[in-house]
Image (tube, grey):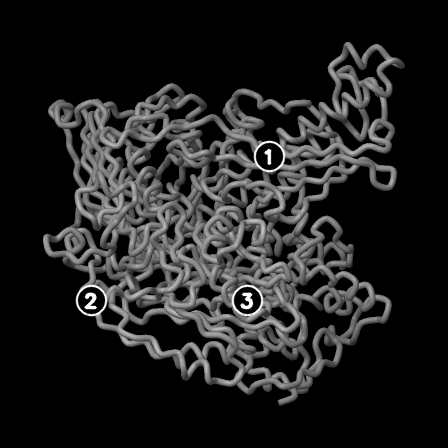
Amino acid sequence: MRVSFTVNGRPQEADDVWEGESLLYVLRERLGLPGSKNACEQGECGSCTVRLDGVPVCACLVAAGQAEGREVVTVEGLADYAKQRAEGCGTGSCGTPLDEARRWAAGGTHSRTGEGTGTVPRATLSPIQQAFIDAGAVQCGFCTPGLLVAADEMLERTPNPSDEDIREALSGNLCRCTGYEKIMDAVRLAAARQSEAV
Amino acid sequence: MGTTGTPTNITQGSRTRGGVGESTLRPDGILKVTGEFAYASDMWHEDMLWGQILRSTVAHAEIVSIDTSEALAQAGVYAVLTYDDLPTEVKHYGLEIQDTPVLAHGKVRHHGEPVAIVAADHPETARRAAAKIKVEYRELPVVTDESSATAPDAPLVHENRTDHYVGHVPHPNILHRQPIIRGDAEEAAKKADFIVRGEYTFGMQDQAFLGPESGLAVPAEDGGVDLYIATQWLHSDLRQIAPVLGLPEDKVRMTLSGVGGAFGGREDLSMQIHACLLALRTGKPVKMVYNRFESFFGHVHRHPAKLFYEHGATKDGKLTHLKARIVLDGGAYASASPAVVGNAASLGAGPYVVDDVGIEALALYTNNPPCGAMRGFGAVQACFAYEAQMDKLADKVGMDRVEFRRLNAMEQGSLMPTGQPVDSPAPVAELLRRVKAMPLPPERQWASSEGADVRQLPGGLSNTTHGEGVVRGVGYAVGIKNVGFSEGFDDYSTARVRMEVVGDEPVVTVHTAMAEVGQGGVTVHAQIARTELGVTQVTIQPADTQVGSAGSTSASRQTYVTGGAVKNACELVRERVLEIGRRKFGTYHPAWATAELLLEGGKVVTDGGEVLAGLTDVLEGECVEVEEEWRHRPTEPFDLRTGQGFGHVQYSFAAHRAVVEVDTELGLVKVIELACAQDVGKALNPLSVIGQIQGGTTQGLGVAVMEEILVDPKTAKVRNPSFTDYLIPTILDTPTIPVDVLELADHHAPYGLRGVGEAPTLSSTPAVLAAIRDATGLELNRTPVRPEHLTETETCWTSPRN
């Protein structure tokens, strides 16, 4: 079957989708967006967290057909999404200006080879992405995309979260490397920077 | 970060920004937060196929027949391979003992053993085809523990063993046995005023790295194969893969792809050979990605263990002796079990001075899942037991539990039970003092004027208590872990470092085969290059087999050994650069010949700070490149009868204090805080060091209260291979982890550093158990603790609190 939906502000179509395929599979294997990770395929780990019409979901538990006509935001689009939110776009998915889209695409050329760690294109990061780097919340990084999407959504709802708020919001995202302390630091940092900016 | 004791050496004292000792940020950080970092499971190739493994559904059985015809007939299937399709006479692999079949032959020895492999054009097609392979099993009796494995009529897991351990083991189902005999424990026991004995059980823990086993094998025109893979040690994989494929090692070109955590679970091969076989058979690129269910079968686990301990002490609290027997379940194949035995035995007395010791450690062959490397590697199980013993003995003597440990703590100059002197700082007593001195979290922190915040209570949002029946407990533990490969292993690393001028700027390129699995080795290599060569621009090349081996990313060794190799190669580059400088400019300034010269800020400077030349001028038209192997000081094997020997390179120490609250009615535990003090010698990157300590601590917490692979004792089948049934700590289960870092230099090591990654995984578990015992008064001789262990009325009560 054919599935059409909006991903990171751009319309996308996937053909020859088998009915049993998940949204995660279509994003990763058919649309070339492997940022959302597959670590358990049963909604326990949160590594595949994306936003579906604004709501955080485990993309492994959403059938691709369920995404028909809807709006999806993945970690690859998080920076643009946050930027547009900051600029007042209601849904945060108003589309990407052409010059930014070109720069974003240029940054993606390394992703298949795993090479080029020394030549990172300096695309603008969302506050939560920058905070994860600055706070040391990234080790192996496999949980990072899902955590970023979940944390960004939490900060959208709760700009000044308590520690308990953060823990509750991120309780569906497993991390095996960090012991979560630096993740807590990162979310606190992003919240603090966000409130300074206002 | 608190620095105590001797200052550490930085060889050339460069103050170049981003060097050793700074918390520089990860070079892969941006790619990882934008989703662009390519993990093994993200690999993609035009026209690629998907591989799938069919695994045994029983633990121990003869294979009567395999029928692949129906699978092969399915549309979209390109190949189905079994043992009979293996291309060479080499049909087994293994880290040390080649006892693991690439595909099962005639027999399976554990649940989930690979039997056949399939390549198809869609992962679901491959899965369905694998399910259509008909395997007829004739089940055999299983051995699952020491008594069944060593019974007179026990079936042998491996008949006709030829490995070099078989000559000294008491039974062919015992893989390896290592005694450690020092002094006379029997005689010394007579001097004891108090003796405590305990039998302890440690459950089977899974590494549960989040990035499942995966890789992409691409057949090459020269008949070879390119493999993009998540592993801990490229060259060890290569040595095992190439002979099975019948290819010379230079035709199996391996590149490290992004690795989603490891923790020991990627030390053994998983799908490497299978993907290569399918790629070479079909002539197409083949990608294999395990799902979580398969991942639980696709790698070895931490050895479950039974530990029998007897300690004695005099009235004034001095340890008299230790007798211990540690039985590790190695499962069906050897993996790293012999080395795990060596660790459990040699570290089995813990960080304490005890002169009269009799320890025996052994690993069984059983039909349980194979066990091997996991963070802490044999030292974890022992620490759980000896720390429980320390609390019991302190109580008997009537001393404070921390003071009792401090009284018996080893220090620099103490002898290990192996006779090896501890010849660098061993601040065991100081770590305990520090962790005890940290402020305790406030009591009843969940209480407020608006009622209890259930999120901070045991049971959390399940809303099972508002504080009723909740009791607090505090527990302490300390541990000792070796760093680096031990027992005479040639544990070297290779680094290639190049310095050249690019775009009018000196640039350094570092190339190693070190597996970056998340620990931050790539960050540290760049820091070392900046410090040693005084430049800011450092490029880290992807790890591959085009450069010499960097050894394994395990045993807390990479910063020490590959970091040491990078430092050494940089020093050689620096010498060559200065030679060039003397040749070109020596006649212009006498300091070239007389002063001690440094590279700093992109320039050659004297130790007095005078600038002699810019590196761009020195290097104009020249490029300096060095590739060198680097070794730490050698170790030696343990004597097979007495366990004596200079077996370990370095020791590392951490101490924990756990504060827990237990809902004693429901048996639910909430860890409130898990404080850690650790000596790291020198923190090359303080942010990463703390990340390692907090991560290791949390894995220790997991095996204290939740994590265990459950294996049916009758069938040897795994009962919980999923994240629904195998629970690892979430952010709600994990408390704040304050960390106090000491930096006492080990002068044998580069920069004085001490391996960091594993020590915090040891003492975390016994500290949590001690805190739960403190809260409940229960004896709790097994880990993990489950609610039923805390609520069973028949459990033996010792000294109920208050």
Determine the residue positioned at 22% across, 40% down.
Answer: B167
Residue B714 lies, with reference to residue B426, above or below; the image says below
Disc 2 element: loop
Q: Chain of mark 1?
A: B
Image coordinates of residue B777 in percent, x first then y, are: 23, 48
Q: Check the image and name the residue furthest to the bottom.
A: A1
If you read the primary sequence from the N terminus, does the residue marked by circle 3 or circle 2 appear first? 2
Q: Chain of mark 2?
A: B
- Mark 3 → mark 1, Cα distance in angstroms: 42 Å
Q: Which residue is mark 2?
A: B140
| Quadrant in the picture for the C terminus of chain A | bottom right
Left or right side of B56 for B227: right
Q: Chain of mark 3?
A: B
Image coordinates of residue B782 in percent, x first then y, are: 25, 51
Check whether the beta carbons of the residues at disc 3 and disc 1 lie within 8 A of each other. no
Q: Which amino acid is tagged 2?
A: Leu
Determine the residue positioned at 61% across, 32% down.
Answer: B628
If you read the primary sequence from the N terminus, does the residue marked by circle 2 or circle 1 appear first? 2
Q: Which residue is mark 1?
A: B684
Q: Which residue is mark 3?
A: B279
Residue B386 lies, with reference to residue B266, above or below; the image says above
| Quadrant in the picture for the N terminus of chain A | bottom right
Image coordinates of residue A143 in percent, x first then y, are: 56, 60
Residue nearest the observer in this picture, B772 or B510: B510
Left or right side of B66 for A5: right
- Mark 2 → mark 1, Cα distance in angstroms: 53 Å
Left or right side of A115 for B87: left
Image coordinates of residue B773 in percent, x first then y, are: 27, 47
If you read the primary sequence from the N terminus, does the residue marked by circle 3 or circle 1 appear first? 3
Residue nearest the observer in this picture, B749 or B247: B247
Disc 1 element: loop
